[in-house]
Image: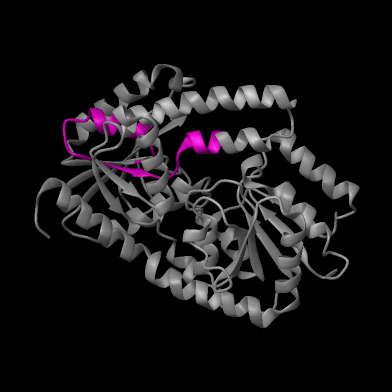
Amino acid sequence: MRIAMLGQYPLDEGRIVGGIEAVMVPLLRALQLFSDLEFHVVTCQPDITPQLSKTGSGLPLHVLERHRFGRLTFHRRDVANLLAALDRIGPGLVHAQGIGLYALAALAAPCPHLVTAHGLVSRETAALSRTRVDRPGALRRLTGDWRGKVDSYYEHHILAKVRNLVSISPYVDQTIEAMGERFPAQAFRGRLFHIENPVDDRFFAIGEPQDQPTVLYVGRVIPRKGLLELLKSFALVTNEFPEFQLRIAGETDAAPEYVDACRRFVGEHHLETAVVFLGSLTMEQVIAEYRNCGLVALPSLQETSPVAVAEAMAAGRAVVTNRTCGMPYLVEHEQSGLLLDYGDTRAWAAALRRLLADAALRNGMGRRGRAIAEQRFRPAVIAAATRAAYYEIVGGSL
C-alpha cells in the first residue's frame, strides 16, 4: 500500500521543533519496517525552493514552498501544490498530521484519508488570550476572541468533512464532542481511531537518574506553556535547594515579550545562577538534558498530549504538571508524577520542594512512568496500530 504522509516534517532530523515533528520522525521510522507499506513524505516550508529529498531513514521527502498568510484564503495555493504532489505520487491513502493545511489537502485528494488531530488551535488561542503579558487587558481579550472565532470556524469546517480521524488523547475526544454539541451542523461524524503519539526509542535507553540536581523544562518559551509561573514557584524553593538548577530547553524566538518578562523575573529575583536558558537544542542535546535531570516540569495552561511529558516518562523521570486538558491522561497523580492547578504558585513550590528533597520518591515515580510509557508510547506499538487503521480504512485485511 502506497501512503502519502503529509505534515510538518523537519528538514534537519537532528533539530526537532514542535510536537508534530517529534512525532513524525519516530512514527515513520517504525512504519517503514512493514514491507507491505510504501511511504512518501510531503511537507511545506516557508521561503524554500521546492525539491525532492530523502528523510534520514531514506524515504522520499517532497518539500514544497509554503506561502505566507495562507490561512486567510484557506491555503488555496498550498493545497493546490500539495494536490499536484499527490498526483505525482499516486497514493492509495493520504495520512495528514494535524487539523489544518495538510488536512485540507487530504480531504481534497481522490483517495481515502486519515487525519491525526494533534491539537485544536482554537483551544490554544483561547489559552493564549489568558496568558499574554505584552498587551493591555482589553486588547488582549479582543485579539484572543477574534483569533479564537476564526480558528474555531476553520476547525469546524475541516472536522465536519473528515471521515477518518486519529485522536491522540481522550481530551481530543471531549473537545470534538463539545464542539459538535455547540455547532451540530458541523459536528464530526466520521470514524474515530484512538492512537497515541510515539516517543523516540532513544528516550527509553536513558538510564535511571543519579540524583542529578536539575529540574528540566522542555518546550518553546511561549505564554501558553506557563514558564513564568514555574519561575515564580522555583524562586520560593531556591534558598532551600541552592544546588538545584532549573534548565530551560526550548527556542525563545516565538514570543519575545514573554521571554523578556521571564528573563526580567530571573534578574529581579537574583536567579541568574539557578536558572539557565539553553535555547533551541539538537535532538542529541535534548536527550542529554533528560539524562542529566532529576525531574521534569511542564506548567502549561493548555496542552493536548504534550510530547515533553511522554518523553520524560519514557526517560524514567518524574513529572510535575497541571491537571488540565490532556495532562491527566498521561500522568498518574502520586504514581508517575504530580498534578497541580495552573497558577497555584505555592502548591507548585510545595510539589517541587517535596520531590527535590526526596530522591527515592521522584525516582520511584520515574520508574512507574517508564513502565507506562513502555506499554503506550513505543514507536513499534503506535506503528502497528496505525497500520491496522490504514487497512480498516481501505477495506483490506492484514
> Extreme left residue here?
396
Number of numbered discs visible in the structure rendering: 0
Q: Nearer the viewer, residue 117 or 111?
A: 117
Q: Residue at x 60, y 27 (%)?
A: 144
Please indicate whether residue 52 sits to the left or right of residue 315 in the image.
left
Q: How is the image coloured?
A: one colour
Query: Which quadrant of the view contains residue 177?
Result: top left
Determine the residue located farthest toward the top in the rendered image. Answer: 73
Q: Residue at x 57, y 53 (%)?
A: 282
**Which quadrant holds residue 398?**
bottom left
| Residue at image point 56% right, 46% down | 302
Q: Position of residue 245 (x, y in %)?
A: 77, 63
Residue 110 falls within the magenta-colored stretch: yes
Say if 102 sits above or below 274 in the image.
above
Q: Position of residue 242 (x, y in %)?
A: 85, 68
Vertical order, 284 against 395 (above or below): below
Q: Is residue 230 magenta?
A: no
In this view, 155 is above or below 281? above
Q: Residue at x 21, y 36 (%)?
A: 89
The single residue placed furthest to the bottom in the displayed view is 360
Residue 259 in sight here: yes
Of residue 56 and residue 267, the one placed in the foreground of this image is 267
Percent x, y of residue 76: 35, 19
Q: Is residue 51 visible?
A: no
Is residue 16 found left or right of 223 in the rendered image?
Answer: left
The stretch in magenta equals 97-125
Residue 390 is situated, as x and y percent measured from the top left of the image, at 20, 50
